[in-house]
Image: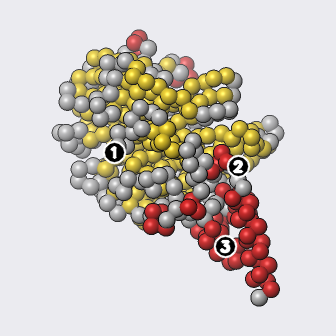
Amino acid sequence: MNKKIIILFLAMLLLTSVINIPAKILQNNKENTNILNLKPSLIDQCWIKVFGGKDNDDIGYSIIQVDDGYVIAGQHPSLKIWLFKLDSNGEKIWAKDFGKGRAYDLKQTTDGGFIIAGSYTFRTSCSLSTYPSSIKLIKTDNMGQKEWVKVFDSNEEHGFSVSQTRDGGFILSGDNATGKDYNHHRPVLIKTNSNGDLEWKKVLDLQRNLKKYINKVEETKDGYILIGDSVIKTNREGDYISHFQTDGYQGQQTNDGGVVVVGKIDQSFYDSDLLLQKYKINGELEWEKVYGGKNNDYGNSVKQTSDGGYIITGQKESETEENLFGYYSYVWIIKTDRNGEIEWQRFYSVGKDKDDSGSYITQTSDNGYVLIGKCGCRDYFVFPIHSVSYNLIVIKTNEEGKVKLNNNIIKGYFKTNLLNFLNTKTLIKNIINL
């Protein structure tokens, strides 16, 4: 009995420390984000999951919701293309790998299967440069079983985006690199039939000063639109029509026919802010918003939401907390209205090394959000080189960007990261069970 009383007393002391976390972690511009105030019914289907080992890099690039859960594409630590499925509670159901390379984009196809765009490479490192690579297209059934794989041989190309077209085929966009060290980049567009057989391929003219980061391709009524740090329109045969440049590097078409992009703007050395821009389809800038503070803040993914606003994820770097290697960083989620005004924002620290960021986010059928990102799981320092191994994180939130925290994660990072987990009942349970 005395032992339990002492443990409970220690638990209350720890919880007091939790409540006194710096306000920047708990608050947005309007309200406290402490999840202790949530009704349980609002967060029962919200969770945080971590995948990977302490010495491995597990990377996710794309996530989609399916009827009974979520499917993620990325890169396995062995540098293989990785596809795996989670149930609605974030538990892994199956995982598949498809040989060397990395997967950048994932879509569900009309037959219930999946199409993956990525790159195939013989490289032995994760670098995108100096190692020849070819675009890789993979079609699977709804269980992730391979149906066919196509590799479009080239000297140095990467497939960043894929969409199924109205004729049942597929359109891919990516990057074509030439020159010494492959440092001259041109957008590439590939059209295939439903079996992945090449119909045509277009490398868009470098003389037009088109940039590298074309991370989205969509079919339009009269052709295709490519979106990234340039927005390019083509006809149905992939021939260039027009383009304009943006200051972002990831985006999508909006409901009004325009384009929204997210990225960063450099303010000074080692100081950048998240940038959100909205363009009309003719290239006219409607508005732009800059979010952030001191140090490096940036956005990696933006989606338009069902209310016409936008959901963004990226990285927010601490202005005060740091270690020997730099400032701590957190997964950052921002919800804005249709004009880019912030409605709420959330910060999540998951990894024990506090080197976290969000990579890709999308709205779910319950009006919540699911995102993938990475968290630092182990620091390596062999003078003068410092490197970090990363795990894949998946966060499912409610419509306010809040979560019910996962017991396993709290146990796994209890000693090093207690102050980032705020569920009172779960904390007491895990403290008693230690």
Earlier-in-chain disc, 2 versus 3 = 2
Vertical comparison of 4 with 339: above or below: below
Q: CA distance from mark 2 to mark 3?
A: 21 Å
Q: Give the mark nearer the N terminus: 1 vs 2.
A: 2
Q: Is residue 192 rendered to the left or right of residue 350?
A: left
- The residue that disc 1 covers is 306
Q: Which mark is residue 22?
A: 2
Q: Nearer the viewer, residue 97 or 329?
A: 329
Confirm or deny contact between disc 1 and disc 3 (CB under 8 A).
no
The percent coordinates of residue 378 (x first, y second) are: 70, 52
Residue 90 seen in the current view: no
Q: How is the image coloured?
A: secondary structure
As rendered, which of 230 and 188 lies closer to the eye?
230
Q: Is residue 426 visible?
A: yes
Q: Amino acid type of disc 2?
A: Pro
Amino acid found under the numbered disc labelled 1: Ser
Residue beneath the point at 40% across and 57% down = 70
Place of residue 334 in the rendered image (x, y in percent of width and height, measured from the top left) = 51, 42
- With 281 as the anchor, is 45 left or right in this view? right
Asked whether disc 1 touches disc 2, contact meaning CB atoms under 8 Å apart, the reply is no
Residue tagged 3: 428
Helix, strand or loop at mark 1? loop
